[in-house]
C-alpha cells in the first residue's frame, strides 16, 4: 500500500561559505555593501578602521551611528536568510532614504571578508546586544539550523546607539589602493552629500541632519595613531575656486547662488558671495519637484598659484577631473547611469567652452551633482533598462535650469575673478589698479617672502608658500608700475579733453543766457499757441543745459584745489537731484532716493570725483532705460553705512535693459562700450566712463561692483568708500 508523508527542504551549513563567495565576488564589493547597510540604517557617519590589514589576518571595524538593531530585528533580520524586510520597508525609518543595500547580502559580505564576526548593536530604548559568529563552524555535512551562535544581552541602556561590526582574521590584505577603490565605488553609487533646500533664505546648504559621511582609517603594526586614507575627490572639494549651488523653489523658479575661494583685491583678501538671476519665467513642469544641485569649478592648467598649492598637487586635481569631471545625476539617492560619465555631455557644457573668453569652462573643469528626490516617479521616470531617465519635458527643463545656472554662475565668477590680484599678476595684458595700498602691500610681501626664504629654520611648506608669494608680489609690483605709466599717459590725454570741455562750457554760459532773453522777448508777442509751446520747451531745455554747465563748471573749478576732503554724500545727492530734475521730467523717469543715516560722509576724496561718480552712474542708468520700450523708467539711489559703520555704501539701480552676462566681466575695461552710432542708442560712448570711475574709487580705497538689484530693477551698481570723520567736514 502506498504511503504519503510531508517532507521539507533542509539546508547544508556549507551554503553560507558558497553564498559568501558567489554572491560577493570581490572584497571591495563586500565592504561597499556593509557601508550601504549603514546608509539604510540612517547613519550620518560610518568609520572604517583597518587594523594590521596590510597582510591577511588583520582586523576591520565598521562603526556607524545609525538606528541600531533590537533583538527581534537582529534575529528576524540579520540571522534570517532571504528576509523580506527590504521589500516591505523600501525606505529608511528616520530620513526616508530609499534602501541602497542589496537584499540579504550584508551577512554574506562579512563572511567574505573575515573568519570571525562580532556585532555590537543598540537601538533606542533597547538593551545593547553582542552577537558572536565564527564562520568556520558552517561546514558541509551538517544542517544549517544546528549551528548555534552566542547572543549576549547587555543591561546597558546608556551606550551609544548604532552598530559596530568587528571582522577579525581578514582573508585578504588591504593596501591604500584597495581602500581607495572602495571609496570610489561607494561614492559612485551613493550621493556625495545630501542637499537641504532652505526656502526661507534661498540658499542651498549641505544638510546637517541627513548627510552621509564615510571615513577610512588604518593603523599597522606598532603605530599608535590612526591615519586617514585620503581620496583625491575629497581633497579636491576644498580646492575649488568657485562653488555654484541652486534649487527649484515651490513656485517652479530657479534659485542660484555663488560662493568663491578667497582672493586678493588690491591686496585685501576677500571672497564673493552672490545670488544669480535666472529665467524670470518659472519652470512649470518642475513645480513641486525636489531638485537641487552643487557644482565646483576648477581653472586647472598650470595656474597652481590660483590654488596656493604645488604643481604636483595641481596635477592630482587635473588628473582627477580628466577621469571624473562633469555633473553627475542622482535620483532618490542613487546614481543614474551615463549622465556625467566620460564623454556624456548631457548639459551641453563643453559646447560652451569658449564663453570664458580665455578662462576655461566645461566638464573637465567642473565636479558636481544634481539631486532629484522623486520616490514615486511622478516627474522623472527611469528607462526600462535603468540606463537613464525617460527624457521628456521635465528632463529638458531640468537640463535648461542646471546648464543655465552653472553658465551664469561661471560668468559671474570670472567677472569678479578678473579683478583679483592673482589673475592680474598671471595675465600680462591686464594689470592691477596702481594704488598706494597695492604698491605697499607688494613691497611688504616681497620683504616677508625674502626673509622666509633666507631663514635656515624655515620649513619646507613655509619656503613653498614664500616662493609663491615672491613670484606673485614681484609680478604685481612690475605690472603696477607699468600700469601707472600707462595711466599717466592717459591722464595727459584726458587733461587735454578737460581743457576743451572747459572752453566749451565757458562759451555755453555766455550764449545760453542771451538766447533765453531773446526767447523771453519773443514770447511777449501774440504768437500761435503751438509756437509758444515750442519756445517754452526750448527755454526749458536751455535751462537744463545751463544747470548742467553750471554743475560741470563748478566741478572743473574745484579741480584747482587739490586737497582731499571729507564729503557729505547726502548733501551732494540733494544738489545732484536738483540738477537732473528737468532731465528726469523730460525723459519721464521716476527717481527714488533712500538715504539711511545722518552722517553719510566720504573720507579723503576730491569734490569733483564725487560729482563724476554720480553723473556717470546716472548717465548709464538713463541710457539703459531709454533703450527699453513700454516701461515706466525708474532709478533708485540708496545710501547707507555698512554693518560696522566703517564704510559708506552708494547704490544706483535702474529698470533698464540690464547687462548681458557676456559683458559683465568687461564693463570696467577701458574703451569697452555696448553703444554704437545708431540713433536708438541715444548717443555714442567712449567706453571710458566706468573705467575712470573704477580708477577713482579704487584710488580712494573703495570698490565698485555689480550687485543684486532690488525687485523691479534690473541693474545695481554698488560703490563702497571709507567713512569720513565729522570733525574733518568742511
Image (cartoon, rainbow, N blue to C red):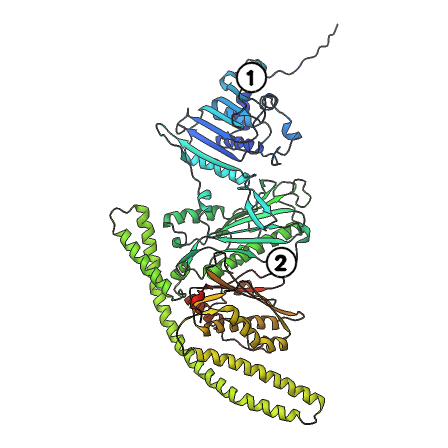
Residue 105 percent coordinates (x, y): 56, 28
The quadrant of the image that shows the C terminus is: bottom left
Please indicate whether residue 196 sits to the left or right of residue 704 in the image. right
Please indicate whether residue 535 sits to the left or right of residue 110 in the image. right
Residue 61 percent coordinates (x, y): 46, 28
Mark sitting on residue 13: 1
- Secondary structure under tag 1 reads loop
Camera-nearest label, 2 or 1? 2
Of residues 203 and 38, the one nearer the viewer is 203
Q: Quadrant of residue 539?
A: bottom right
Q: Is residue 517 above or below residue 15?
A: below
Q: Residues within 10 Å of mark 1 (few under 14, many from 20)?
A: many
Residue 334 percent coordinates (x, y): 58, 40
Q: Residues within 10 Å of mark 2 (few under 14, many from 20)?
A: few
Badge count: 2
The CA distance from mark 2 to mark 1 is 63 Å
Residue 514 in sight: yes
**Of label 2 and label 1, which has the lower sequence position?**
1
Mark sitting on residue 675: none
Q: Quadrant of residue 387?
A: top right
Of residues 282 and 645, the one nearer the viewer is 645
Residue 348 in sight: no
Q: Is residue 97 above or below residue 363?
A: above
Q: Which residue is mark 2?
A: 279
- Secondary structure under tag 2 reads loop
Residue 521 percent coordinates (x, y): 63, 93
The quadrant of the image that shows the N terminus is: top right
Of residues 541 and 262, the one nearer the viewer is 541
Circles 2 and 1: CB atoms closer than 8 Å:
no
Amino acid at each position: 500500500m502506498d504511503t504519503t508523508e510531508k517532507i521539507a527542504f533542509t539546508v547544508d551549513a556549507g551554503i553560507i561559505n558558497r553564498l559568501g563567495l558567489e554572491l560577493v565576488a570581490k572584497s571591495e564589493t563586500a565592504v561597499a555593501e556593509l557601508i550601504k547597510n549603514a546608509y539604510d540604517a540612517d547613519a550620518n557617519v560610518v568609520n572604517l578602521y583597518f587594523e594590521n590589514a596590510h597582510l591577511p589576518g588583520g582586523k576591520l571595524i565598521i562603526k556607524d551611528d545609525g538606528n541600531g538593531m533590537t533583538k527581534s530585528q537582529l534575529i528576524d533580520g540579520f540571522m534570517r536568510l532571504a528576509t523580506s524586510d527590504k521589500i516591505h520597508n523600501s525606505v529608511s525609518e528616520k530620513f526616508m532614504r530609499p534602501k541602497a543595500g542589496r537584499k540579504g547580502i550584508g551577512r554574506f559580505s562579512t563572511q567574505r571578508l573575515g573568519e570571525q564576526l562580532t556585532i555590537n548593536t543598540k537601538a533606542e530604548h533597547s538593551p545593547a546586544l553582542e552577537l558572536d559568529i565564527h564562520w568556520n563552524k558552517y561546514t558541509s555535512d551538517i544542517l544549517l539550523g544546528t549551528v548555534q551562535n552566542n547572543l549576549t544581552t547587555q543591561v546597558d541602556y546608556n551606550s551609544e546607539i548604532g552598530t559596530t561590526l568587528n571582522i577579525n582574521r581578514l582573508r585578504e590584505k588591504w593596501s591604500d589602493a584597495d581602500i581607495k577603490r572602495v571609496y570610489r565605488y561607494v561614492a559612485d553609487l551613493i550621493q556625495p552629500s545630501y542637499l537641504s533646500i532652505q526656502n526661507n533664505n534661498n540658499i542651498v546648504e549641505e544638510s546637517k541632519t541627513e548627510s552621509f559621511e564615510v571615513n577610512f582609517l588604518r593603523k599597522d603594526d606598532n603605530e599608535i595613531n590612526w591615519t586617514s586614507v585620503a581620496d583625491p575627490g575629497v581633497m579636491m572639494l576644498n580646492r575649488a575656486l568657485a562653488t555654484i549651488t541652486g534649487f527649484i523653489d515651490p513656485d517652479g523658479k530657479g534659485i542660484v547662488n555663488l560662493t568663491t575661494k578667497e582672493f586678493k583685491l588690491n591686496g585685501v583678501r576677500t571672497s564673493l558671495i552672490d545670488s544669480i538671476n535666472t529665467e524670470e519665467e518659472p519652470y512649470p513642469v518642475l513645480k513641486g519637484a525636489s531638485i537641487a544641485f552643487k557644482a565646483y569649478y576648477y581653472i586647472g592648467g598650470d595656474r597652481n598659484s590660483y590654488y596656493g598649492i604645488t604643481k604636483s598637487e595641481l596635477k592630482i586635481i587635473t588628473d582627477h577631473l580628466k577621469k571624473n569631471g562633469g555633473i553627475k545625476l542622482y535620483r532618490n539617492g542613487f546614481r543614474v547611469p551615463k549622465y556625467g560619465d566620460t564623454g556624456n555631455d548631457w548639459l551641453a557644457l563643453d559646447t560652451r567652452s569658449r564663453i570664458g573668453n580665455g578662462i576655461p569652462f566645461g566638464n573637465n573643469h567642473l565636479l558636481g551633482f544634481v539631486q532629484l528626490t522623486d520616490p514615486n516617479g511622478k516627474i522623472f521616470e527611469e528607462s526600462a533598462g535603468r540606463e537613464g531617465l525617460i527624457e521628456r519635458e521635465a528632463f529638458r527643463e531640468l537640463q535648461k535650469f542646471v546648464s543655465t545656472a552653472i553658465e551664469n554662475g561661471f560668468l559671474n565668477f570670472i567677472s569678479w575673478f578678473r579683478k583679483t590680484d592673482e589673475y592680474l599678476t598671471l595675465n600680462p595684458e591686464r594689470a592691477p589698479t596702481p594704488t598706494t595700498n597695492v604698491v605697499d602691500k607688494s613691497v611688504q610681501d616681497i620683504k616677508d617672502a625674502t626673509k622666509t626664504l633666507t631663514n635656515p629654520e624655515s620649513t619646507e611648506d613655509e619656503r613653498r608658500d614664500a616662493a609663491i608669494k615672491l613670484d606673485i608680489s614681484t609680478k604685481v609690483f612690475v605690472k603696477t608700475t607699468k600700469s601707472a605709466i600707462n595711466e599717466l599717459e592717459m591722464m595727459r590725454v584726458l587733461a587735454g579733453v578737460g581743457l576743451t570741455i572747459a572752453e566749451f562750457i565757458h562759451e555755453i554760459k555766455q550764449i545760453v543766457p542771451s538766447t533765453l532773453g531773446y526767447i523771453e522777448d519773443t514770447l511777449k508777442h501774440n504768437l500761435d499757441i503751438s509756437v509758444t509751446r515750442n519756445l517754452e520747451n526750448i527755454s526749458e531745455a536751455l535751462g537744463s543745459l545751463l544747470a548742467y554747465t553750471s554743475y560741470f563748471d563748478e566741478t572743473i573749478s574745484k579741480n584747482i584745489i587739490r586737497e582731499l576732503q571729507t564729503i557729505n554724500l547726502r548733501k551732494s545727492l540733494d544738489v545732484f537731484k536738483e540738477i537732473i530734475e528737468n532731465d528726469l521730467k523730460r525723459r519721464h523717469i521716476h527717481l527714488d532716493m533712500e538715504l539711511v543715516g545722518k552722517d553719510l560722509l566720504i573720507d579723503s576724496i576730491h569734490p569733483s570725483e564725487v560729482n563724476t561718480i554720480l553723473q556717470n552712474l546716472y548717465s548709464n542708468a538713463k541710457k539703459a532705460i531709454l533703450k527699453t520700450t513700454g516701461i515706466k523708467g525708474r532709478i533708485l539711489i540708496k545710501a547707507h553705512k555698512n554693518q560696522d559703520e566703517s564704510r559708506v555704501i552708494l547704490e544706483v539701480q535702474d529698470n533698464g535693459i540690464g547687462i548681458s552676462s557676456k559683458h559683465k566681466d568687461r564693463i570696467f575695461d577701458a574703451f569697452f562700450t555696448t553703444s554704437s552710432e545708431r540713433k536708438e542708442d541715444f548717443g555714442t560712448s567712449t567706453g571710458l566712463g566706468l573705467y575712470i570711475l573704477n580708477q577713482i574709487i579704487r584710488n580712494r580705497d573703495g570698490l565698485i561692483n555689480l550687485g543684486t538689484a532690488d525687485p523691479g530693477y534690473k541693474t545695481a551698481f554698488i560703490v563702497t568708500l571709507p567713512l569720513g570723520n565729522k570733525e574733518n567736514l568742511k
